[in-house]
Image: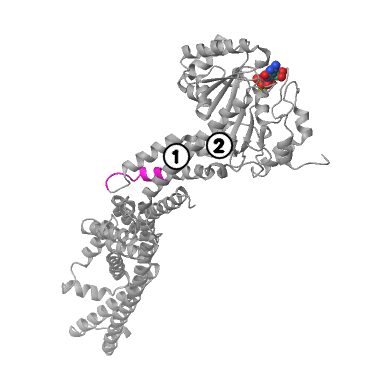
Amino acid sequence: MTDVESPRARLAGSGPADSGPADSGPADSGLADSGLELTTAGFARAGFPGPGFAADEVTGGAALSDRLTALARITQIGSARSGHDGFDPELLRESEDLLARAGERLRLSAGHTVVVLAGGTGSGKSSLFNRLASADFSPVGVVRPMTREAYACVWGMEGAGPLLDWLGVAERNRYARSSELDAGESSMGGLLLLDLPDHDSVLAGATGSVNRLVSLADLMVWVLDPQKYADAAVHSRYLVPMAGHSSVISLVLNQSDLLTPQEAHDCVEDLQRLLETEGLHDSQVLVTSAVTGAGVADLRQVLIRTVSARRASTARIAADVDALAARFAPYAGQDGVEGPEQHYAALVAAFAQAAGVAGVGRALQSARELKAVDYVGWPVSWLADRLLRRDPVRKIRLGTLWDELRSMSAGPAGAHRAEIDNAITVLSDEIAPGLPAPWPATARSAARSQVDAIPSALGRAIADALPAQNSAALWWRLVAVWQGLLLGGAVAGLTWLVVLVVAGIFGALQHTTFSNVALLPWIAVMVAAILLLGWLTASGCMTLVARTADREREQAEQKMRAEIAGVARRMVLLPVEQELSVYGRFRDELAVARGEG
Ligand SMILES: Nc1nc2c(ncn2[C@@H]2O[C@H](COP(=O)(O)OP(=O)(O)OP(=O)(O)O)[C@@H](O)[C@H]2O)c(=O)[nH]1
Ligand SMILES: [Mg+2]
C-alpha cells in the first residue's frame, strides 16, 4: 500500500469493466490488494461522507427521510389530540395514508433505490453484480454456494448507512460507486444494488422473508441459468408466492453465451409462458451474459428506469409532505409559549386559601393556648371564672377544636372545591391564551387531569403539617407545680387566718408564736402576696404561651404552604408543563417536516 490512490480513483478504476469478471476466482486477495477494503473501511469510519453521489443531490430526498419521520411524530401527537376542537381527523388520516405509502423503507432512506439480485447458486448473481458495479466487489468462484453474506454497492453512499444496517449488510461488504469518473452513470445515482446469497440460504422457503425482501426492494432481479430456469421447485417455492408483486420483479436469463441465439429465444419464450401461467404477468424477462457483457446494458437500463421511477415517486411524496406540513402549520402558532411557573405562586395561594390554612393556624394557636391554661393558669382566677360562670364552655371548646382541626385535614369540600376549580381555570387561561387550538384546551385538561384528587391531597398536606397531639410542654408542667405550691401556701395562710379569727372570737387562743393575734395583718399580707404572685405568674406565663403558640402557628402554616405547593406542582403544574413540552416538540417536528429544521 505504498502508492495508495485516492479511494475514489480506486473505486472507479479497479473494476473489470473492460475484461469482465469471468473466472476471476476468489477475489478476496484481489480486493484487498486493490485497496478497495481500505476504501470501504474508510467510509464506515467516516459515517459515509465518502465519494460518490450525495443522495439528496440526486433526489432532493435524503432530508425527506427526516421529514417523514417528523411527519410521523406530529401525526402521532395530533392523533392523541383529535376530535372536537382538536386536530382535523381528515388531515390526520391523509397524513397516515401518506406515511403508509412512503413506508418504513423510505423513512430509512428516501434517496436510495434498492435493487436485489436473487436466484439459485451458480446462476451468476455475483458476476452480474460485479459487471454492473464495474468492479470485483463480490467474490465469484467455483465453490458452491459462493456468496454467504449480502454485498452492497451504492451509487451515492451518503445517508445509506441506516438502510444498509436495516438490510443487514455487514460494513465490510459495503462498497461505493463514484459518479464523477463514470460518465453517464449519474442516472444511477441513489441506486443500492444488493448481491444476495443463493435463494435457499436467504429465503429458506419462508414466505415471510420473501415478502419482507420484496417489500424492501424497489426491484427484485431474479437471476436464472439456462439449465435451471424452469426448475419447478424454484418456481413454485419462490416465484409463485411473489406473483402479487410481479411489476417489481424482473427475470434475467444469464449465461446466454452458453446458448445459441435460437436456444436463448426458445428459453425466453418458454419462461414467459411459464410466468404467464403462474400469474407473473408484469414481470420482464431479459437475457444476459455476465461473461461477454451481452444484455448487461439492457439490464442497466432497467435499473436506471427503476431509479428514475423511485425518484419520481420520492418527489411526489416530498410534495405531499410539503402540502400536509403546511396544513399542520396553523396548529403551531407564531410564537413559543411561556411556562406556567410565573402563575405558580398565585395557584399555591389559592390552594392554601381553599384548604383554610389560616383558619387551621388560628385553631391550632387557640387550642395550644387553651390547653396551656390548665397548667400555667392561676387556679384561683379559673375558680372565680367557674363561680362567676364567665367561661363555662372553655373545656368544651378545647375538645371541639381538635375535632375541627381533624375535619379540616380531611380536605376542603363544597365551596372550597369551587375555589380549587377556579384557581386551576385561572392558571390555564393565563398560560394558554396565545396558543392556537387545540392547545389551550389540551393545556386546560392537563391542568385539570387530577382535579378530583386535589382536595384529599390538600387535606393530607394539612394533616402532615399539624402536631400529632396537643401535648403539654415540660415547662408548663413545672409552672403547674409552682402554681400548686402557691395555691397550697395561699390556702394554708387563709386557714391560719380563719383559725386565728375564730379562736380569737371564742377566746380559745393559746399563747404560742402561731396564735399571736398580732400576726393577723402579716398573714393577710402574705396571703394577698401569694395570690398576687400566682396571678402574676399566670399572666406572665400566658404571655409567653401566646408568643410560643403564635410561633407554632407560623411554623405550621409555613409547613402547610410548603406541602400545598408540592401538591400544586405535582398535580397541576407538571401535567401542564408536560403538555407544553409536547407543544414545543410539535413545533420543532413541524419545522423539520417543512424542511426548515
Ligand atoms: N459462461 C458463463 N459463466 C458464468 C456467467 N455468469 C457467471 N458465470 C460463472 O458461473 C459461476 C458462478 O457465478 P457466480 O457469479 O459466483 O454465481 P452466484 O449466483 O453468485 O453463485 P452463489 O454466490 O453461489 O449463489 C462462476 O464460475 C462464473 O464465472 C455467464 O454469463 N456465462
Ligand atoms: Mg454469489
Residue 150 in sight here: yes
* Vertical arrangement, residue 408 with respect to residue 538, above or below: above
Q: Residue at x 69, y 27 (%)?
A: 138
The residue tagged 2 is 112
Q: Position of residue 212 (x, y in %)?
A: 51, 26
Mark 2–mark 1 Cα distance, whole angstroms, equals: 15 Å
The residue tagged 1 is 316
* Vertical arrangement, residue 234 with respect to residue 402, above or below: above
Q: Position of residue 123 (x, y in %)?
A: 64, 17
Q: Earlier in the sequence, mark 2 or mark 1?
A: 2
Ligand 2 position by quadrant: top right
Badge 2, how many Cα within 10 Å: few under 14, some, many 20+?
Answer: many
Count of numbered labels shown in the rendering = 2
- Residue 281 shown left or right of residue 533 in the figure: right
Badge 1, how many Cα within 10 Å: few under 14, some, many 20+?
Answer: few
Task: Tell me the magenta residue range.
Answer: 74-84
- Residue 21 shown left or right of residue 105 in the figure: right
Q: Residue furthest left?
A: 389
Q: Residue at x 72, y 31 (%)?
A: 15
User: For numbered disc 1, what is the local secondary structure?
Assistant: helix
The quarter of the picture where the N terminus appears is top right
Badge 2 amino acid:
His
Q: Nearer the viewer, mark 2 or mark 1?
A: 1
Choose between 539 and 133: the one closer to the eye.
133
Q: Quadrant of residue 393?
A: bottom left
